[in-house]
Image: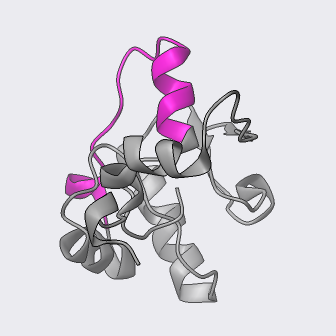
Amino acid sequence: MTHGDAGYGAGKIAAEEGDAAELVDPRPYAVGSLDRVLDEYSHLERVLPAMGYSDQQVADLEATIENADPDLVVAGTPHDLSRVVDVDAPVVRVRYDLRVKNRDLGDVLDAHADVLGLPADSERP
């Protein structure tokens, strides 16, 4: 997933809805920049953040994935991760669309404020 204030993203949702046998905690396997990001974003649970794509960050991401030895990588980033990393596990890209039906956008944001890292409705301008 793309790192930030959200605790999870489309990849985790897809894995759960696809009845994944296990979501791997990347913390014990993280190296370099990913280890530091996981420390900084301690609210992330069983997701691997993808951050910029410098050569070193890509190397850290590849090493972390290889260390975890997953059966499959579910990529919920806006980028096609399979074109960026070279890992042994297959990489499946998850995409999503937001469709709001019969709801005000403010109601949707309120319902998911904690995940999106938004302030409560009463605290928004």
Residue 103 relative to residue 117: left or right: right
As for residue 73 lying within the magenta part, the answer is no
Q: Position of residue 120 (x, y in %)?
A: 28, 60
The number of discs equals 0
Q: Residue at x 62, y 88 (%)?
A: 54
Snapshot quadrant of residue 32: bottom left
Q: Residue at x 71, y 57 (%)?
A: 81
Quadrant of the snapshot with the C terminus: bottom left
Q: Is residue 102 left or right of residue 23?
A: right
Colour mapping used in the image: one colour
Residue 56 in the image, given as x and y percentages of width and height: 53, 86
The answer to whether residue 61 is seen in the rendering is yes
- The residue positioned 74% from the left and 66% from the top of the image is 84
User: In the depicted view, which residue is nearer to us: 94 or 35?
Assistant: 94
Q: Is residue 101 left or right of residue 47?
A: right
- Which span is picked out in magenta? 11-30
Specify whether residue 24 is painted magenta.
yes
Q: Residue 57 in the image: state x and y as whole percent.
A: 52, 81
Camera sees residue 71 = no
Dividing the picture into quadrants, the one containing residue 30 is bottom left
Give the residue drawn at x 63%, y 87%: 55
Up-down: is 117 above or below 32? Answer: above
Q: Nearer the viewer, residue 66 or 125?
A: 125
24 vs 39, left or right, is right
